[in-house]
Structure formats: C-alpha cells, structure tokens
Image (spheres, grey):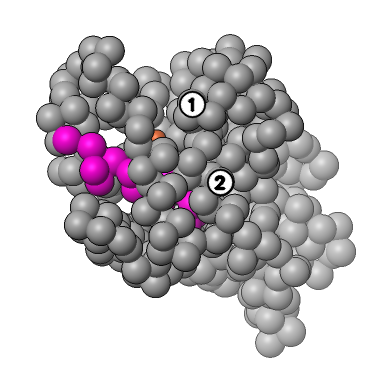
Amino acid sequence: MTDGAIFLLTDRPDRSAALETILNTVGRCAVVAGEETPPPGAPVAIVSDLTLSRRESVGRLRALMPSGQAARPGPGPVAGQAGRIPVICLMRSTSDGDLRQARDLGATVCLPAYTSPHVVAQVIRDQVAARDETARGVAGQGIVRATEALTGLFAGARVGGVTLGVVEAGLTPILAAVREGGLTRWLDTVWTHDDATYQHCLLVAGVSAQFVNFLRFPEQDRQHFVRAALLHDLGKARIPQAILNKPGRLDADEMAIMRTHPVIGYEILRDSGCDDATLGAVRHHHEMLDGSGYPDGLVGSAIGDTVRLLTICDIYAALTERRSYKEPMPTRDALAVLESMDTKLESGLVRCFGDAMTAVAP
Ligand SMILES: [Fe+2]
Ligand SMILES: [Fe+2]
C-alpha cells in the first residue's frame, strides 16, 4: 500500500502497541487514541480496537468513516463495493447486536478482540487486494462503454449526423468507475488508449465525473455534465488527423482550422436534436471570462455555469495529458496554471476544482 495511512483506533492503555507494530509491516500505521486528532488525509484502511459498547467510541469510529462506507448511509451517494475501504472491528463482545452495529457503522470484517495481529494484517492485505481488483474491473468496464459511445459518435460525425442515444450508455459506467475506482485508476486506464482525441475526451469525462461527484450534484445533473464532457470536442471528428495528431505546436493556419471544432460540433449536435445546455457547452468550451476566447468572444455573464465548469476540466485535462512529445504536467503545476488564469476562469470554481482533484479518491 502506498497512499494513505492505516488508522488504528484504540482505547487500550498500551495503545495497541503489538498490533501497531504488525500493521506497520502492511503500510503506514497511524494510532489514534482517546480524543487525539487523526492525521490529515483519508485512511486506506481502519482497524478499530475500541469498546463499541461505549457511545463515544461509536462516535469516534463513525466520524472517521468515509462517506458511503456505512451500511445505512445518509441521503448522499452510496459507494459501491469497490469504493469501500477495509474496516476491521476487533470485537470485545460478539453478540448479534454488537456485530450488527459494527456492520451498520461500515465494518467490512469483524474479528474477536483476541485475534492475532498477524491475522488482522493478513485480512487487510486480502481486502485491499480484492478492492483493487474490483476497482480495476470497474474502470476497465467504464472505459469500454465510454469508448463504444465515442466510436459511434465520431463515426457518425465524420459522415453526417450522430445518434445521441449511443452516448447515454457510456455515462453511468464513467461516473461509477470514477466514484468507485477513483480518478487515478481511471486516468491510468485512459492512458492506454491509442487514439489521442478519444483519450482526451475520456480524460475530460473522467475529470468532469470527479468534479461533479465531489460537488455532489444530483445524479441527473452529473449525467448531463459528463455527457457534455464526452461530446465537447465532437467537432474534431472533421479536423484532419494530421492536425489533430501533430507532435508539437500548430502553426497559424493549422490553428485556424483547429479552432473551427467548437462550431462544427455545435452544428452536428444541433442537427441531431441535442438540448440547448449541451449545445452551449460544446460551442463555448473555449470561451474565456475576459472575452479572449473563441468562437464568439463571449464575456463574463454571457458564459453559463456548465460552460465555466467544463472549460476548467478541459484545460486541466489538456495540461496533464501524456503525449509522446511532452511530459504530463503534475497536478499541482496544472492547478497553479489554472489559478494564474484568474481573469479568464472563475477563481472560486478553480479553487473548488483543485479540492476535487486533490481529494483522496474514492
Ligand atoms: Fe475543444
Ligand atoms: Fe477539449
């Protein structure tokens, strides 16, 4: 395990020292005893060596549990199995009621308190391995579905119009893959795609999914936004491959051709019966608040919220893309570039976007 710590919650006088020693062989173990503040960042796993019959112990465990982990969640989105971290509860009592309480809190395994620390460590290893496997599968499925949608759309756009129905099947798998498998795994899978334009669209769609999941948009709005992200560069279907895949900077003539893609995409989708919000996002995703963007040179309030969000996702994706001729920009540097564009992008949204990208997924 490389990222995040294993939180060991304890109320034992010896701070569960033997267990801590063994857990440090699995990953970095952070002991949280009594009212101590846990370290920053989300845990990669939690081991509870608490007396769960005490109300304050239940409160402490609940406070550290990731959203979507509990078996009886609140009204927010529920993470799938791949979105749950291993939570091992060492039970001082194993009555039916106590076990049910631990499960409801989000425990993935309940073990008797006298269980050997070596066994606890092995259970964590097994659970993390199983979770990674599931997450890989979810990301792979999402990429397959989204690629099918893109292939159908771009093929249609090259020869005439598109059938918008084909995009719908790609939306839920993308949102689920990013929510359950995490953005990092989605991006790692997207890099293996060999078509640069599809890769970019999948990247923008994944980043957009992370953003709207983070903002806790209603499900319908999430789907609508990811749909716009998948469609935003559809006009590139009619831009010559030599320009799209040119390794390096475009000259002025090539750039002029490239800059026609928002209007081309808009016209294809308008003729296919697309809704106005998506049409606006496709046409205007290169507009800037200070009027320096294209194709219409819109200024300030003329640029709607969906467009503002999508533009941030698009620029971030372009900066962090991997290409044979350029190194991907690290997340922190890309976020600094976005922040420096404070006359062009909405600063509050950029800050929020930064929080979404640096949040430990899932
Ligand atoms: Fe674009
Ligand atoms: Fe784009």
Which image quarter is the N terminus in? top left
- Do the CB atoms of the residues marked 1 and 2 lie less than 8 Å apart? no
Q: Is mark 1 within 8 Å of ligand 1?
A: no
Which residue is farthest bottom? Answer: 96
- Name the chief secondary structure element in magenta: helix
Is 358 contained in the magenta span? no
- Residue 76 rendering spot, x and y as whole percentages: 70, 64
Is tag 1's residue or tag 2's residue first in the polypeptide sequence? 2
Name the residue carrying label 1: 294
The magenta segment is 226-240
Residue type pointed to by label 1: Tyr
Q: Secondary structure at mark 2?
A: helix
- Residue 173 rendering spot, x and y as whole percentages: 41, 65
Horizontally, residue 58 falls left or right of residue 137, namely: right
- Residue 347 rendering spot, x and y as whole percentages: 69, 23
Q: At 52% across and 37% down in the image, what residue appears?
A: 284
Q: At 79% across and 44% down in the image, what residue appears?
A: 34
Residue 231 vertical position relative to residue 81 in the rendered view, above or below: above
Horizontally, residue 349 falls left or right of residue 28, namely: right
Residue type pointed to by label 2: Gly
Tell me the crowding category of disc 2: few under 14, some 14 to 19, or many 20 or more residues within 10 angstroms, Cα based. some
For the residue pair 359 and 31, the one nearer the viewer reads as: 359
Q: At 67% across and 54% down in the image, what residue appears?
A: 216
For the residue pair 20 and 130, the one nearer the viewer reads as: 130
For the residue pair 200 and 136, the one nearer the viewer reads as: 200
Q: Quadrant of ligand 1?
A: top left
Q: Is residue 39 visible?
A: no
Using the image, tell me which numbered label, if any, was put on residue 280: 2
